């Protein structure tokens, strides 16, 4: 296959690139390196090309697609790193998504695979959240990503939008796991927000993307999760145990900030029924696999799409994605 991956230098994009190159596909990455890194991609590979640019630049997207002629397009580019920068979120997540859709249509791409955030559900009434739950995003990231998914649904192109739990695997640089790992290793103070999240291992994520890319695969919107929720404190305890550190006093727990949600756990039952996809890794094994990766490679920059809760010193806060 000839696969365009927007945001291909990011965490998910670079894992997908590596995976597709390994199984023999051709990959074109488009990335502006806002949160991704050139070093996450192979320095040179005969079946990979890289365009440094923004999906918000329609001419650049068009030129790239026209020359490469992708069969599936994987839309992984997203803006979230500055929650106050609504314009950049709108440029990338709305305008950029419209550009990707319009260009994919123009060059005859067979389908688009999109990644959406569980924050599209806003503050859910029911947890685990069924894929039919109402979408009520209330952050710039959530609102703009929701608009992108809505335009995709409007496009008439075959599409699969995967609403993702926290995908955990190589180069993860957001959320509680890298935060706790980095700070505990440096003997820095940590804080846990009183929140619950679900996690899914990178291998299980790659499996659902493979299934979703097949021409005959179902289309539509699907939750990707194990369906089980875990607290930040549970993660903190696993990291403490793994590193063999002994914090001087019990970790402080704080209420979620105003733009955070206490519990986000996705119900994957429709995805399981549609694709016969079932995660192979449970929570503890997923955490330990992640920590083993940090032992080998370390933690890079850590991003968040959340504002810090006001008040106390929150420099050590590990907030969920
Ligand atoms: N990783 C997860 O657990 C998770 C959870 C929910 C949703 N998602 C979604 O999955 C996708 C990938 O997330 P990720 O974790 O790999 O994040 P990431 O930040 O590692 O990757 C996003 C990539 O997009 C690039 N990018 C940003 N703006 C761009 C632009 N205008 N043009 C081109 N490239 C641009 C960044 O440089 C980065 O390489 C995103 O759409 C995100 O919303 C991920």
Image (cartoon, rainbow, N blue to C red):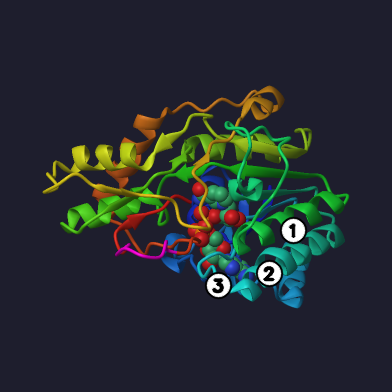
Magenta stretch?
308-314
Mark 2 in CB contact with mark 3 (< 8 angstroms): no
Mark 2 in CB contact with mark 1 (< 8 angstroms): yes
Q: Which residue is mark 2?
A: 90
- x, y percent for residue 170: 40, 49
Which residue is at the front of the view, 284 or 309?
A: 309
Taking the spot 66% from the left edge, 30% from the top edge, the residue there is 271
Q: Residues within 10 Å of mark 3 (few under 14, many from 20)?
A: some
Give the distance between the C-alpha atoms of the residues marked 2 and 1, in whole angstroms. Answer: 9 Å
Taking the spot 34% from the left edge, 62% from the top edge, the residue there is 300
Q: Quadrant of ligand 1?
A: bottom right
Q: Secondary structure under badge 1?
A: helix
- x, y percent for residue 274: 71, 26
Give the distance between the C-alpha atoms of the residues marked 2 and 3, in whole angstroms. Answer: 11 Å
Which residue is at the front of the view, 67 or 51?
A: 51
Q: Which residue is mark 3?
A: 84
Nearer the observer: mark 2 or 3; the answer is 3
Nearer the observer: mark 1 or 3; the answer is 3
Q: Secondary structure under badge 2?
A: helix
Give the distance between the C-alpha atoms of the residues marked 1 and 3, in whole angstroms. Answer: 18 Å
Residue 80 seen in the current view: yes
- Mark drawn on residue 14: none
The answer to whether 225 appears left or right of 273 in the picture is: left
Q: Which residue is mark 1?
A: 147
Instruction: Indicate yes or no: mark 3 CB to ligand 1 under 8 Å.
Output: no
- x, y percent for residue 99: 77, 67
Q: Was residue 311 drawn as part of the magenta stretch in this picture? A: yes
Mark nearer the N terminus (2 vs 3): 3
Mark nearer the N terminus (1 vs 3): 3
**In this view, 145 is above or below 250:** below
């Amino acid at each position: 296959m000839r696969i365009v991956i927007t945001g291909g230098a990011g965490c998910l994009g670079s894992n997908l690139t590596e995976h597709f190159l390994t199984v023999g596909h051709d990959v074109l990455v488009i990335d502006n390196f806002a949160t991704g890194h050139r070093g996450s991609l192979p320095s040179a590979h005969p079946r990979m090309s890289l365009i440094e640019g923004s999906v918000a630049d329609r001419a650049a997207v068009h030129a790239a697609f026209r020359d490469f002629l992708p069969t599936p397009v994987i839309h992984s580019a997203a803006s979230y790193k500055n929650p106050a920068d609504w314009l950049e979120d709108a440029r990338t997540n709305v305008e950029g998504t419209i550009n990707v859709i319009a260009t994919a249509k123009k060059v005859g791409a067979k389908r688009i695979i999109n990644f959406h955030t569980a924050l599209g559900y806003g503050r859910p009434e029911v947890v685990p959240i069924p894929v039919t739950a109402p979408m009520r995003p209330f952050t710039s990231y959530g609102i703009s990503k929701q608009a992108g998914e809505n335009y995709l649904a409007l496009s008439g192109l075959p599409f699969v939008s995967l609403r993702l739990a926290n995908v955990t695997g190589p180069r993860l640089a957001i959320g509680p796991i890298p935060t706790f790992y980095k700070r505990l290793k440096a003997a820095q103070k940590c804080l846990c927000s009183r929140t619950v999240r679900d996690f899914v291992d990178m291998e299980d994520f790659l499996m659902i993307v493979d299934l979703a890319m097949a021409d005959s695969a179902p289309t539509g919107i699907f939750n990707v999760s194990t369906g089980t929720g875990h607290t930040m404190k549970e993660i903190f305890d696993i990291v403490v145990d793994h590193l063999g550190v002994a914090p001087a006093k019990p970790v402080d727990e704080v209420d979620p900030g105003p733009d955070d949600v206490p519990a986000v756990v996705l119900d994957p039952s429709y995805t399981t029924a549609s694709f016969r996809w079932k995660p192979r890794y449970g929570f503890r094994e997923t955490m330990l696999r992640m920590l083993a990766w940090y032992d080998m490679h370390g933690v890079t920059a850590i991003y968040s799409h959340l504002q810090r809760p006001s008040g106390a010193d929150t420099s050590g806060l590990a907030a969920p994605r």
